[in-house]
Image: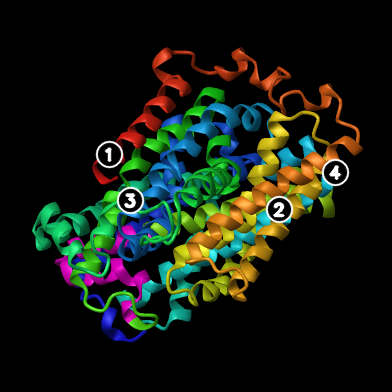
């Protein structure tokens, strides 16, 4: 990348940026005083209120996937990108809060892989722990690469220098303050991110003549009228997204979205850190409400970029779709506002990477090191291991950042990772939670077969054997294939093995009492207006209604 993206920041912009970094590190230092045990470091002592964990839940997802990736998708695919929010997130977030959190929180598991150990066996546990650890450092690399893009544009540094410096910033406050530092910084970052992105949307819309002017300009662009609709022409793949409604509904809306939001420990960890069952269940549902409106500051700027930046969509250089947001910042924002926007972007990538790293260090310490390498050591030992794992995760993330740099649209890369790691895991989880007869070894082989099936689908697509119309269609179908394979293997193997006794499954499988008993489900707050079912139902209805103007 040359100097075409260099941002003209002055002293005021740098002051705003410096104040933010000082605040972030200050939060980490303050959080350190509350860390006495490994549970404090990895799970915030399970003591946080729902509004804090809810905002942290959505902020943890506001990394490169949202800001750079969704703006790139908005420019490349138009309003069909909205599927990633209204069908690809909200229903799954509500399902997590209403149905799955009672099992996670009530069983007192410290991680998602630990649930698999209790429900199935240690091989299934180890397989998921290893695959999750790999996925987190790969996704951390995406966030780190996006962070480096902005620092490169801001300072003109080489990409590798920007990646290393960005990694050190995140490493400092996670290592010092643990998950509590990450969560409270994510709450702060949520508001900083909005403060940085809203001006891009407002000034951009003013430049193109408001919403009507933007719509007219999109019709005259390469996207055309198809870029202004969500479900039109999805009977086949002749649409900007290159996917049919079957792939969108089943692949994205069910397998990929439920796989990510309900089993990705980087998100679930925020809910597990809540102070009681009610707060844990409301965490993802509270997050669903701001999630619905995030497209206003991601997808809309992507559309603005495609009609105002000539040549956007190049394979290399400054005009790749990934640079839609930095290009708008360069072209639209005045002094002071530019500083806020740059700070917001850096905050978003730091939030995303911090979520990946905090999930990685927890799973590595509890589910790999403590479970299989060094058992029965003092708690302080695992606290030290966690801090070392944080450093190791960041170092590996530096390496994986260069993998992300090879993709023109990092959203496509992310979807490949989700289809490989999250889709088969979700299928194994959901079948195991609702079918108590499913055996331990059926769980292991189902998970392994589903992962292998998703990988084979991707490799055959890359080799030209499977003629999907786009990378995203491949990820949708790959996730669907993984789900079906898990179900088939579970059905075939379960009759040949013994089921676990009911006593061992209590609180882990639906219908056996324990954590899914009504009293436990409402523990902490039984007031009607805080009902997860009520709040979740409203969120799903709103998400469906939002589709009406853009069908």
Which secondary structure, mark 1?
helix
Describe residue 415's horizontal placement relative to residue 239 as left or right: right
Q: Which residue is mark 3?
A: 232
Say if 130 sits above or below 543 in the image: below
Indicate which label's residue lies in the foreground, 4 or 2. 2
Q: Which residue is mark 1?
A: 548
- Looking at the rendering, which quadrant does residue 63 occupy? bottom left
Tag of residue 73: none
Describe residue 329's horizontal placement relative to residue 40 as left or right: left
Please name whichever residue, 474 or 527, is drawn nearer the observer in this view of the structure: 474
User: In this view of the protein, can residue 362 be seen by the observer?
Assistant: no
Q: Which residues are magenta?
A: 318-346
Q: Which residue is mark 4?
A: 441
Indicate which label's residue lies in the foreground, 2 or 1. 1
Q: Is residue 332 magenta?
A: yes
Q: Which residue is mark 2?
A: 450
User: In this view of the protein, can residue 321 be seen by the observer?
Assistant: yes
Which secondary structure, mark 4?
helix
Alpha carbon distance from label 2 to label 3: 31 Å
Q: Which secondary structure class fits the magenta region best?
A: helix
For the N terminus, the quadrant is bottom left
Instruction: Give the mark nearest the N terminus, 4 or 2.
Output: 4
């Amino acid at each position: 990348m040359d100097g075409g993206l260099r941002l003209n920041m002055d002293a005021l912009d740098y002051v705003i940026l410096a104040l933010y970094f000082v605040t972030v590190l200050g939060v980490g230092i303050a959080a350190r005083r509350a860390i006495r045990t490994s549970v404090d470091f990895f799970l915030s002592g399970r003591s946080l209120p729902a509004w804090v964990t809810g905002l942290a839940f959505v902020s943890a997802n506001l990394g490169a996937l949202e800001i750079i990736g969704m703006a790139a998708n908005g420019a490349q695919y138009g309003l069909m990108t909205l599927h990633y929010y209204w069908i690809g997130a909200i229903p799954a977030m509500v399902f997590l809060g209403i149905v799955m959190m009672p099992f996670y929180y009530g069983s007192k598991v410290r991680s998602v892989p630990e649930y698999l150990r209790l429900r199935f066996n240690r091989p299934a546990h180890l397989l998921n722990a290893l695959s999750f650890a790999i996925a987190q450092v790969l996704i951390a690399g995406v966030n780190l690469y996006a962070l480096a893009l902005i620092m490169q544009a801001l300072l003109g540094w080489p990409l590798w220098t920007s990646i290393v410096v960005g990694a050190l910033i995140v490493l400092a406050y996670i290592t010092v303050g643990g998950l509590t530092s990450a969560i409270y910084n994510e709450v702060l970052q949520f508001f900083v991110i909005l403060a940085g992105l809203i001006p891009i949307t407002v000034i951009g819309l003013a430049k193109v003549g408001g919403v009507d002017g933007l719509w007219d300009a999109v019709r005259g662009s390469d996207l055309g009228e198809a870029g202004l609709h969500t479900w039109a022409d999805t009977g086949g793949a002749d649409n900007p997204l290159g996917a049919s409604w079957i792939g969108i509904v089943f692949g994205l809306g069910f397998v990929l979205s439920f796989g990510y939001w309900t089993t990705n420990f980087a998100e679930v960890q925020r809910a597990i850190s809540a102070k009681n069952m009610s707060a844990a269940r409301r965490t993802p549902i509270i997050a669903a409400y701001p999630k619905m409106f995030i497209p206003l500051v991601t997808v809309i700027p992507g559309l603005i970029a495609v009609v105002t930046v000539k040549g956007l969509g190049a394979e290399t250089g400054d005009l790749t779709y990934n640079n839609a947001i930095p290009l708008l910042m360069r072209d639209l924002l005045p002094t002071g506002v530019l500083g806020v926007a740059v700070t917001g972007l850096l905050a978003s990538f730091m939030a995303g990477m911090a979520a990946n790293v905090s999930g990685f260090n927890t799973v590595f310490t509890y589910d790999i090191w403590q479970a299989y390498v060094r058992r029965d050591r003092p708690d302080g030992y695992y606290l030290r291991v966690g801090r070392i794992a944080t450093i190791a995760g960041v170092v590996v993330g530096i390496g994986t950042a260069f993998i992300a740099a090879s993709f023109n649209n990092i959203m496509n890369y992310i979807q490949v990772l989700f289809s490989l790691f999250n889709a088969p895991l979700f299928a194994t989880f959901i079948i195991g939670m609702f079918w108590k007869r499913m055996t331990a070894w059926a769980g292991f082989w189902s998970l392994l077969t589903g992962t292998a099936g998703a990988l084979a689908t991707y490799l055959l697509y890359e080799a030209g054997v499977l003629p999907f119309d786009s990378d995203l269609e491949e990820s949708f179908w790959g996730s669907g294939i993984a789900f079906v394979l898990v179900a088939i293997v579970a059905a075939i193997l379960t009759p040949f093995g013994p089921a676990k006794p009911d006593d061992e499954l209590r609180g882990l499988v639906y219908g056996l009492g324990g954590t899914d008993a009504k009293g436990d489900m409402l523990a902490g707050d039984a007031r009607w207006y805080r009902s997860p079912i009520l709040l979740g139902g409203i969120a799903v209805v709103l998400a469906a209604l939002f589709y009406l103007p853009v069908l």
